[in-house]
């Protein structure tokens, strides 16, 4: 994917003395008192900001936080806690500026944080008037927020249309490289794990991957629907019987290419959905009418682990069972460890997937962990993200 990279501009000295506008993803979780409870996204944004400062640029950074109403700023919408944490990480004060659309005062070597960009009128619908005002603030626009790359908004798309230079920051560039390596030019066999509660939310992803991957491992409620499609009983497990036809079509599409959707041969069941519910391992052919399937069984997990260890590329989106409950975590744990031990290039994304990676301590052994939820899913669907599209257009001149 051909885009201008901010790292190249800095290396060439083209950022010195320039006004650099960075769209970061600083949308972090907070408790009821407004305290940040998890700062991964802020820490991930620091390299780009530091790169701009080291290059001698005048640096402006903005992000959305939460779901504010445009034109109606409320105290809980403020990036003030983010400014404080960012200052701690950068080792310098980071002033927070409100009402910044019509002009920002910042000198080379300085950094300012611009208040919640989603409060600005016209941000979400990407109004041309706002986009042109944003572009007038800078000499270089840097998109470094992959989590927003699937949205065509004022600070993600509009500003990139009109800024003198529009480029990808290091975080976005790393996502582009990882996605290209995993999907555009993968080392085979290519295995994808797609799990979650509903086929309907990931049907287009499953259909898209069925055209490309060698193994499509399904888990969670999605696997239950595929078990129905394979003629198995699933008791009272979560599933979407009305989508059995679509699941069969995915299985058939894979089979026609000599690929497969491995259907569980054993499962872990309970009579109720609870952390303390007694768990029983059963053959997939022996599920009773009042059973809930809450995980894949040990034989299935071991078989999938062997396939993953032999893969060339692995794409992971979603735990394969209710891994939050100790009795139903084995499948996800075994798959996580297999990915960690595999020689394959692995890329993982999605909130629950990141939680599983953290729980099993394998973050250093996954090839690339994507920071974007919705954006990651849209890439798996085969969509071209708006941010990628406009940055490619600008790179082409």
Image (cartoon, rainbow, N blue to C red):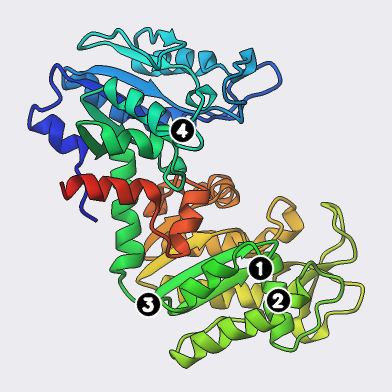
Q: CA distance from mark 2 to mark 3?
A: 28 Å
Q: Could you tell me if residue 297 is visible in this image?
A: no
Looking at the image, is mark 2 or mark 4 earlier in the sequence?
Answer: 4
Image coordinates of residue 355 in percent, x first then y, are: 58, 46
The residue pinned by badge 3 equals: 189
Circle 4 SS class: helix
Q: CA distance from mark 2 to mark 4?
A: 36 Å
Image coordinates of residue 46 in percent, x first then y, are: 35, 26
Q: Is 91 or 113 nearer to us in this picture?
A: 113
Residue shown at 61% from the left, 61% from the top: 332
Q: Could you tell me if residue 83 is visible in this image?
A: yes
Image coordinates of residue 16 in percent, x first then y, are: 12, 20
The residue pinned by badge 2 equals: 243
Residue shown at 50% from the left, 57% from the top: 377
Q: Is residue 258 above or below residue 316?
A: below
The numbered disc on residue 41 is 4
Kindly report which numbered mark, 2 or 4, lies closer to the viewer in this rendering: 2
Give the side of residue 387 with respect to residue 140, left or right. right
Q: CA distance from mark 3 to mark 4?
A: 32 Å
Which residue appears farthest toward the left when viewing the image? 12
Looking at the image, is mark 2 or mark 3 earlier in the sequence?
Answer: 3
Looking at the image, is mark 3 or mark 4 earlier in the sequence?
Answer: 4
Image coordinates of residue 170 in percent, x first then y, are: 28, 38
The residue pinned by badge 1 equals: 199
């Amino acid at each position: 994917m051909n885009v201008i990279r901010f790292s190249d501009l800095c290396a060439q000295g083209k950022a010195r003395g320039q006004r650099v506008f960075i769209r970061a993803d600083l949308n972090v979780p907070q408790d009821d008192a407004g305290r940040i409870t998890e700062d991964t996204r802020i820490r991930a944004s620091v390299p780009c900001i530091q790169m701009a400062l080291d290059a001698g640029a005048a640096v402006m950074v903005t992000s959305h936080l939460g779901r504010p109403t445009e034109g109606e700023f409320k105290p809980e919408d403020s990036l003030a806690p983010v400014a404080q944490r960012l200052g701690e990480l950068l080792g310098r004060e980071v002033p927070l500026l409100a009402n910044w659309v019509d002009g920002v005062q910042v000198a080379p070597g300085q950094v300012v944080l611009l208040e919640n960009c989603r409060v600005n009128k016209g941000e979400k619908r990407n109004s041309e008037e706002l986009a042109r005002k944003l572009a007038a603030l800078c000499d270089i626009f840097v998109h470094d927020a992959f989590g927003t790359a699937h949205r065509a908004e004022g600070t993600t798309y509009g500003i990139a249309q009109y800024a003198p230079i529009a480029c990808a920051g290091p975080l976005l560039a790393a996502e582009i490289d990882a996605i290209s390596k995993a999907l555009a030019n993968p080392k085979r066999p290519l295995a994808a794990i797609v799990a979650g509660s509903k086929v309907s939310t990931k049907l287009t992803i499953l259909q898209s991957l069925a055209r490309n991957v060698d193994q499509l491992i399904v888990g969670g409620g999605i696997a239950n629907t595929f078990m129905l499609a394979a003629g198995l009983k699933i008791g009272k497990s979560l599933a979407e019987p009305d989508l059995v036809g679509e699941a069969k079509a995915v299985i058939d599409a894979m089979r026609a290419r000599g690929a497969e959707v491995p259907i569980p041969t054993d499962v872990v069941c309970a009579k109720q959905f609870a952390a303390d519910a007694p768990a029983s391992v059963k053959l997939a052919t022996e599920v009773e009418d009042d059973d809930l399937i809450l995980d894949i069984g040990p034989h299935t997990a071991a078989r999938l682990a062997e396939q993953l260890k032999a893969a060339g590329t692995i794409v992971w989106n979603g735990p394969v069972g209710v891994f939050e409950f100790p009795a139903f975590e084995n499948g996800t744990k075994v798959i996580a460890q297999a990915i960690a031990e595999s020689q394959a290039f692995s890329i993982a994304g999605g909130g629950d997937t990141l939680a599983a990676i953290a729980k099993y301590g394998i973050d250093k052994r996954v090839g690339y962990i994507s920071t974007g939820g919705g954006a990651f899913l849209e890439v798996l669907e085969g969509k071209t993200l708006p941010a990628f599209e406009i940055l490619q257009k600008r790179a082409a001149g």
